Image: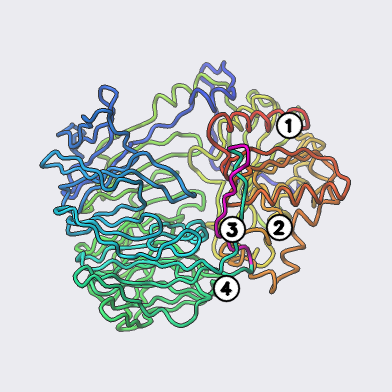
Amino acid sequence: MKRFILLLNLFTATFSFGQNKNITLDDLWKWGTFRIKSVPGFNGMKDGNHYTQIDIENGKQQINVYSLQTGKKIQTLFANTQQPAIHIDDYAFSNDESKIVIYTEGQNIYRRSVLYRVYIFDIKQGRLEPLSNEKVLHASISPDNQKVAYVQNNNLYCKFLATGDLISITQDGKRNEIINGNCDWVYEEEFEFTKAFEWSPNSNYIAYYRFDERQVPEYTMAIYDSLYPTQYTYKYPKAGEPNSIVTIKSFDLQNKQSKNLNIGSETNQYIPRIKWTKDPNKVCVYRMNRHQNKLELLLADVRNGLSETIYSEENRYYVEINDNLQFLSDGESFVFSSEKSGYNHLYRWNWSKKKLTPLTFGNFDIDAIVGIDEPNQQVYYTSTEKSPLQRALFCVSLNGKHKKLLTPQEGTHTIIPINGYHYFLDKYSRLNEPPTFSLHEMNGKLVRTLEDNQELKNRMKDYHLGKIQALQLRAKSEMLNGWMITPPNFDSTKKYPVLMFQYSGPGSQEVADRFPIRDYFWHQMLAQKGYIILCVDGTGTGFRGEEFKKKTYLTLGNLESDDQIAVAKNLRHLAFVDSSRIGIWGWSFGGFMSSTCILKGNDVFKMAIAVAPVTNWRYYDNIYTERYMRTPQENEKGYDDNAPEKMANGLKGKFLVIHGTADDNVHFQNEVMLVNALINANKQFEAEYYPNKAHGISGGNSRYHLYKRMTDFILQNL
């Protein structure tokens, strides 16, 4: 026991009320037995006293207005009386709330880019009109409520609502060559945004990206849809390969001309964000070098294209890009987050006075800026100050004083502020407690509960669920956070097989005080069948400071797998663990890890499942991979020493590898190359593929089939 210590039982949950049902795959993937309710379409209104949400009345969706204080329905804004009725995927208000942009018939291109058929609903006139005859991307009403900008066929357009006049802002858009106003694949995936244009505050300008991806290598995958499969080809820059050349332009709506903004002569760089300041003529352009260890913020004047550097930051590893930056109305400062202290904290930077004011400090990480109430000089943010596993809402003044905790309840609080900063919506959950959506005054006082998921809580009482507990475990020299589900009627004098689950990617977190943890009810189903389920966040995961997260720099997979293997070895010291029956599984980066673990830790793991795994980082995209590994040309050993493809000769246990053939993110090539290496090493294994399925392997019966396949493999081999 000296090497494996359950140091801290942070919180536990045992469901013991009439437990008589077992979970089935039908519950999970056909019947929606454990569906979690939310507050659909919730939008706080400008007056700070009302909100809107999507309701279903007489079988049709409606957009209704409610009082924040009482929850009483005030009026119906959109009755959806059309024949046939529109299915509302999403909606957004104009700035003056006189119009609603309604998005319907959503069609995903990649993870974040969605083509919609768009309608503009004039509330006062009760008139619904289509924006375009075709589906479009990123339809956005201007701040003056008069125009809508959108992207169609790689070009950016602006439509005047009063007259119906249409301006073609760009004309050179062409698939796999030039993109205007939308991101290329790798920016969308790794910088986590897809709308690549922004309205100026006065609606006179649109700042937008132009991607020239002609030099980016192409990747082609077969779509098995006809006698001769369709060959889908798109631009995908793998590690070490050329990127799109990005320019940032501004379009003047008055003279109808575009102008290049000065972002320097270097083209082998990234522009991970643009953001308007409070000045309608000044836009901030984020500029980052290819190694992603230097970030500069450029202040560009859209009238003449000239720019100046107002902030610069360098890091010996890499600089994280996020949306934690908000400009203040003084015209010379902003609030942002940085890891410059070793933890992610908030700062106020005045670029005119060159003055940096820390707003938060300590050995914890800030999660996100929720909002800034300038009239009252308050910054609202969520952080891990109470625990790396939890999120709480705090406020602090813009001078870094008078910090207050606004959500004292232990657990995870996800916050949506209401305009005016009189109220906020709190999605609150714990490891053993489904989410509750509640409305609070900004001092934290509860106004009322909008959704408590009591139906799900009652249903869970009918099922034979195992106990889940958070704990800390030692792996080599580090204490790691974990959670464990033990079988119902667990008996410590008996021995149980253990299935480990993890993701392990840089900055990720699977062990948190929130509900549900990933695949919670499937893991409970396995616990009902006699398995202990264990998840451990190892070295490289997030919210424990910069050094813990970035320790894996240049050697992805090495320390992370060391931790999982060490935990598995230490399980042998627990009397209730059957040390001959330890398995591991994961998806994406987690699939990379489970592959690495069974090959590298072949004396520990009896079986492994890898879903959509990276099998050599040479096959993955350059923004993500080079952030942590630099290029293969610079770090050949780092790439190959930790690649499952190169470890195939080490396989001893039972191994199942699974992939979608149309995975645009982690290409099916990864599975093919690993399978080929296993064959060459004369190793027996099992492989599954899902035709025409992407990284999430979803749609139709695929999820049910996938989880049945994995369940059967576990039951047979662990």
Given this view, does label 3 or label 1 mark the residue nearer the observer? 1
- Res 305 → quadrant: bottom left
Given this view, does label 2 or label 1 mark the residue nearer the observer? 2
The magenta region covers 226-239
Task: Please give the residue where the numbered disc 4 appears in the rendered image.
Answer: 291
Residue at left offset 26%, top offset 37%: 53
Q: How many marks?
A: 4
Q: CA distance from mark 2 to mark 1?
A: 25 Å
Q: Residues within 10 Å of mark 4 (few under 14, many from 20)?
A: some
Please state, as top left, top right, bottom left or bottom right, where the C terminus lies in the image. Answer: top right
Identify the mark at residue 713; answer none if there is no mark: 1
Task: Please give the residue where the numbered disc 2 appears in the rendered image.
Answer: 616
Given this view, does label 3 or label 2 mark the residue nearer the observer? 2
- Res 95 → quadrant: bottom left
**Residue type, mark 2 in image:** Asn
Task: Please give the residue where the numbered disc 3 appears in the rendered image.
Answer: 506
Q: Is residue 442 left or right of residue 244?
A: left
Q: Nearer the viewer, residue 10 or 317?
A: 317
Please state, as top left, top right, bottom left or bottom right, where the N terminus lies in the image. Answer: top right
**Residue type, mark 1 in image:** Phe
In terms of secondary structure, where does tag 2 sit? loop
Q: Earlier in the sequence, mark 4 or mark 1?
A: 4
In terms of secondary structure, where does tag 3 sit? loop
**Residue type, mark 3 in image:** Pro
